[in-house]
Image: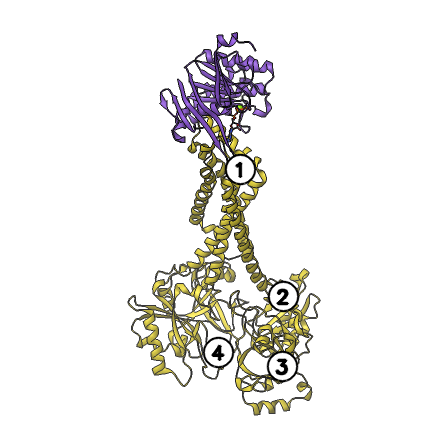
Chain colours: A yellow, B purple
Amino acid sequence: MNILSRKNKWAAINIIGIAIAFASVFFASSYIKHELSFDKFHTKAEQIYRLNIDKPGKVGFMQTTDNVNTASLNAHYIKDLYDKFPGVEQIVLMVKPFNYTLKIKDQIYPLENAYYTDHSFFTLFDFKLIQGNKEGLFQQLYEVVISKESALKYFGSTDVIGKELTLKGEFDSNGGTIYTVKGVFDEFPSNSHMKPDVLLSSNLETLRNPYGHAFTYLLLHPDVKPDQLEVSLNKHWKENVAEAEVSPTFKLMNLREIHLKSHKKDELGSNGTIKTIWVIMSGAIIILLIAMINYFNLNTVQLNSDLNNLKIKIINGANLLDLSLSQIKKSSIQISLSIIIGTILTFIFDRFIEFNFMIKDEGVLFIFLVLFFIVLFGAISLLPLQTKKISSNLSNQKEEGSKKFIISLVCQFTLSIVALVLTIVLHQQISKIQNFHPGKDKESIITITEFPYAAISKFDLFKEKALKYPEIQMISSTMMPPGTTPDFVYPFEMEGMDKSENNTISINSIDHEFFKLFDIKALAGDLNLKSGSSYMWESAAISPNEESATKNINNLDPSYRNFKEQYILNESASKKLGFKNPQDAIGKQFKYNFISPTYFKQGEIVAVIKDLHYADMFSEEKAEVIGLKRIFNSTFLVKIDKNNTSKALQNLQETWSQLFPDQP
Amino acid sequence: MIKIENLSKVFRTEEVETTALNKVNLEIKEGEFVAIMGPSGCGKSTLLNILGMLDSPTSGKYHFYNNEVSKLKEKQRNKFRKGNINFVFQSFNLIDELSVYKNVELPLKYLRYDFGKKKKRVLEMLDRMKIGHRKNHYPQQLSGGQQQRVAIARAIAPNPKLLLADEPTGNLDSKTGLEVMNLLSELNAEGTTIVMVTHSERDAEFAHRVIRLFDGEVTIENTKKEFAQIEY
Ligand SMILES: Nc1ncnc2c1ncn2[C@@H]1O[C@H](COP(=O)(O)OP(=O)(O)OP(=O)(O)O)[C@@H](O)[C@H]1O
Ligand SMILES: [Mg+2]
C-alpha cells in the first residue's frame, strides 16, 4: 500500500475518475445493449412486422389529426389483408379491453396490460408458459392466460390452472363474464416492447370488430419484401377502399425496431429513442476520455517524481520490461480498486435511475469491460514510461515530457467543457421533465384513472366527501392522466386573427384547482381561476347539433348558465398564436370550435403557463389551449398530506368505494 | 580491462556548450584500484558515467574487455553493464520505499536469480557489510554510514567486475568514511576492480593509482609509490 500512500491525493482522484468512467461505460453499454436487443428474442422476429398508419388525415367525423396516429388499427384498415396479400402468413391481433375490472372471489382489481387475442399469438411470439400447455390454448372463448406476477397477485400462487376470474365491463348489466385460467407465462423479458399481464381469448371475428382498435402483427414469408408489401398495401387502399377522405399511409415496422423507432400514442410500453442512445453513449465516451487523459497525466507526474528511483533501478540492471512490469503491478492495484468502486457505483446508479433492466445479468459484458479497462488503463500507465525514454536520458532528464503534458491538459480542458455542457443539457432536460411533468415524482399527489364515465358526474360529490378528511388536501381533475397528451385538435377563433386561416390547436381540460394542486405559476396573467361550467350545463351543451344544444341550455336554470369561459395557453400555444410576449395574450377573446359548437363558449385568455412537458425529452412540446371543462376529465387528482399518506389513502379508498362500490 | 583513447564529451544545451572531457586517454587493468581526483566541475563524474556506460562519449574510443562500446546503443550498453559494472554514489541512492533487504535484492532480481540463491546472496552481502540485523528497516531509518554500507552491499551483490564509486565518503564523517574505505579495499583485494572519484587525499591513499583531472584533461597520473613521494 506504500504505492498508494505516496501520491495519495492524485491517485485517489484518479481512482475515482476511472471508477466513474467504469460505471458510466458499464451503465451506458448495458443500457445501449438492452435498448438494441429489443424483441430479438423472438425466433421469428426477423419476419414479424407491425402494421401502422402514418400521416393520417381526416377520418370519418373525427377532425383530429392525432387520433388515428396510433399503434393500433381499426379493423377496416386490415380487412383485406387476409385474402388479398399472399405473402402474409399469419396475422395476430391484440385488442385492449377498455374500462374493465377484474373480479377474483370478492376482490376487484383494475384490468391492466390486458389484451384480447387468439391462439395465433402463441405460435407467433416466443414466451414460456410455466403452467399450462400452448397446444390447444385459446381455441375457445373465455380462456385466460396470465403472467406469473399477476397469478401471485390475484391468487397468491402460480398453481392456478382452472381458477376463474370475472371480467366486468362498465356497461355490463349482468355479473360480467367468467374466464378460466388456462396458463401462466413467465414474465416477458425486459427487452420486450410488450409486457402483457393478462391475455384473454377471443376469435378473429370479434377481434376484427370495426369499433375496436387492434395492434396488428404480421408474419411475412421470408421472400416478401416489406417495402413492396407496403407499396401494394397503400396502392390497394387508394384504389379499392379509400373514401373521399385523405388516405393514410401504411407502414410496416419490424418487430425489433418498434422499441426505438415507433412513438405512437398507444404503444404497448414506453419506448426508447435513438437520440437517447447517442447522448448516453457520447457521455460515457467523454467521461472515459477524461479519465484516460487524467490517468496519463497522473502517470507522467508520478514518473517525474519517481525518476530517481527509476534511474537507480536501471543502474542496477533493470530494463524496460522490468520497469514496465513494476509499473503494471502498481497500476493494476489502482485499476482493480477503480473497477471495484466503479461496480459499486454502477449498482448505486442503477438503483437511483431505475431503468428497469438488470445490470446483474450482464456478467459477460462486465467481464469484457473489466478486461478492457485493465488493458486500456494498464497501457496508459506505460505510455509515459515509453515516451520519456528515461533509460537513454540517465544523466539528463527534464523537458520533453512537458509538451505532451500540456497537450493532454488542453485536451482535457476541452473535453471537460464539452462534458460540462453535455451534463448541463442533460440535467436541464431531466429536471425539466421531473419538475414540470405533473404528477411525476410527487408522492403526495394521487392520480385516479380508469373509472366509469358515471364517476365524472359525481366528481363534485366525491370532492366534497373526500375533502372532509383533513389528510386529503385538494382535489382536481383533468382530461388525461399526467404524462399523456390529450387527443383533441380542432380549429379555433382568436381575436385579431384571420378566421380563414383555419388553424387547429389541441385542447386539454382541467378543473379550476389544477394549477394550485401542482403549484404551477403563471408566466403571465392570473391562475386564480373561477370554477368553470357545471356538469349540468356541459351535458346540455355537448351535442353536435347546435340548435338542440342551445335549446337544452336554455331549458336549464339560469344559475347554470352564469359562468364565464376562461382559457389558459401554454407557452407554445402563445407562440403559435403569434404572441411574442405571453403578456400580450392576456385578455384576448378566444373561441374553440369543438364538434359540439356550443360546448366551448367564447371566452377570455386569462393566463399563460409554461409548457407542462408531457412530451418526452426530445419531442416538440405541443401548443395547447386549456379550458375549464369537466365532462372529459377522466382523471382525478388528489393531493394528500405527505406525512400521513396511509391514513389519507385509507380515507380516499373509503370515500371512493362508498360512491362507486364496483370500482377499485 | 578498460582502454580509453581520445575520449571527449561535450554537453550542448540551448545556451552553452560545455566540454566536460577533452581527449582523455586512460588504461585500467583488472584488479586495479584507481582514484580520480580534481577540482569541482572538471569532469570526474562525467568520466565515471561513461566508464559505467550510463552515458556515451561524444567522440573517442572506449574498449571494455576489448569490445568497443562507445558507439553501442542504449540497450546493448545495458547488457554489457548488467552484472558487470555497478555503482556507489555519494548520496547512497537507495530506494526509500524499499527495505534494506529489497534494495540489496534489486540487481539480483533483474539478473533473474532464483529465489533461494537470491536470498542467500543478499543475506551474505548484508552480513558482510555488517548490516544484516537491519535488513527489514527502510533507508530513512539508517545512519549515513549504514546507508552507504547497504549501497555497497547492493553494488557488489551481483559480483561485478568493475565497481565505480563517485565520492562514496562524501556524505560521511571521517570515521565512517574510513570504514567504507576499508570495505572497498577488502573488495579490491578479493579481485573487484574499483574506480573511485574522491576529493579526499586520505581516501585516495587506498588506491593503487591516482588520476588527476583538470578542465576535462588528464594532468597527472601517479602510481602509489610516485604519489607517496610527491609533496604538497
Ligand atoms: N547533463 C549535463 N548537461 C550539461 N552540462 C553538464 C552535464 N553534466 C555535467 N555537465 C557539465 O560538465 C562539467 C563536468 O561536470 P562533472 O559533473 O563531471 O564535474 P565533477 O568533476 O564531477 O564535479 P564535482 O566534483 O563538483 O562533482 C561541468 O561543467 C558540468 O556543468
Ligand atoms: Mg561529480
Q: Does residue A373 lie above or below B80 as drawn?
A: below
Which amino acid, by three-letter code, is at mark 1?
Gln
Query: Which residue in the protein does label 1 denote?
Result: A302
Type of the residue with mark 2: Ile
**Few, some or many C-alpha atoms within 10 Å of disc 2 (few <14, some 14-19, many ≥20)?**
many
Q: Quadrant of the N terminus of chain A?
A: top right
Q: Name the residue under label 4.
A: A65
Foreground of the two, B198 or B4: B4
**Sequence order check, earlier mark of 3 and 4:** 4
Disc 3 and disc 1 on one polypeptide chain: yes
User: Which is more toward the observer, B115 or A94?
Assistant: B115
Quarter of the figure with residue A472: bottom right
Where does the image place residue A348, in percent across and percent down from the top left?
55, 50
| C-alpha span from label 1 to label 2 | 55 Å
Mark closer to the chain start, 1 or 4: 4
Looking at the image, tell me whether mark 2 or mark 4 is earlier in sequence order.
4
Are tags 2 and 4 found on a single chain?
yes
Q: Mark 1 lies on which chain?
A: A
Give residue A606's position: percent from left, percent from top: 66, 78
Residue appearing at x 35%, y 20% in the figure: B66
| Label of residue A535 in the image | 3
**Front residue of this view, candidates A78 and A233:** A233
In the rendered image, the vertical position of residue A615 relative to residue B232, given as above or below: below
Ligand 1 within 8 Å of disc 1? The answer is no
The residue type indicated by label 4 comes to: Thr
